[in-house]
């Protein structure tokens, strides 16, 4: 009974930890990593190509009020995104890009539905 307890205490006090201390220390992602989507609202031409090509129908076009009037722009449901990057490849002005952000914490999956204003 004392053996396992002593082993646990010894490991907690004297041995190096195996996990990263998140969020103080963040893991660096490789160049090929595909994370959250980012949208440059100024260069978006509302072509809907990203919504059309999305294999999982994750992207839907919604109306957004901008300083130039009403525009339709992509809204992303990150809970269903495959991170395939087809949307970024097909975007003519290249305003939709994938970042290296890997933080997707949410209590409710509706929180993962990201409006165009939040994709910046």
Image (cartoon, rainbow, N blue to C red):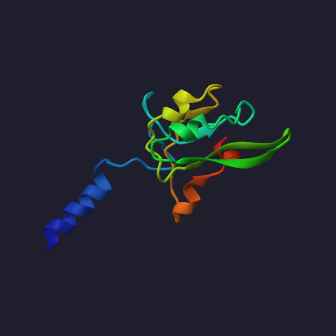
Q: Is residue 30 above or below residue 22?
A: above
**Residue in the picture at 71% in, 43% down:** 72
Quarter occupied by residue 39: top right
- The residue lying at 59 percent from left, 29 percent from top is 91
Q: Nearer the viewer, residue 2 or 112?
A: 112
Asked if residue 34 lies left or right of residue 42, the reply is left
x 51%, y 56%: residue = 105
Q: Quadrant of the N terminus?
A: bottom left
Q: Residue furthest bottom?
A: 1
Location of the C terminus (image quadrant): top right
- Marks counted in the figure total 0
**Left or right placement of residue 65 versus residue 115 in this view:** right
Give how far across and how far down residue 36 sits, in percent. Answer: 53, 42
Say which of 78 and 51 sits in front: 51
Left or right, 30 with respect to 105, comes to: left
Q: Quadrant of residue 43?
A: top right
Q: Is residue 105 above or below residue 84?
A: below
Examine the rendered structure and indicate whether residue 3 appears above or below residue 101. below
Give how far across and how far down residue 4 sits, in percent: 17, 66
User: Where does residue 50 sit, x and y in percent of width and height?
Assistant: 57, 37
Left or right, 9 with respect to 4, comes to right
């Amino acid at each position: 009974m004392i053996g396992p307890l002593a082993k646990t205490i010894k490991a907690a006090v004297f041995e190096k930890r195996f996990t990263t201390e998140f969020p103080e220390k963040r893991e660096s992602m490789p160049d090929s990593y595909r994370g959250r989507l980012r949208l440059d609202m100024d260069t978006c031409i509302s072509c809907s190509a990203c919504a059309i090509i999305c294999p999982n129908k994750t992207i839907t076009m919604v109306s957004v009020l901008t300083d130039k009037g009403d525009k339709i722009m992509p809204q992303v449901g990150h809970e269903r995104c495959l991170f395939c990057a087809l949307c970024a490849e097909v975007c003519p002005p290249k305003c939709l890009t994938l970042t290296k952000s890997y933080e997707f914490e949410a209590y409710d999956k509706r929180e993962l539905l990201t409006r165009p204003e939040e994709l910046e």
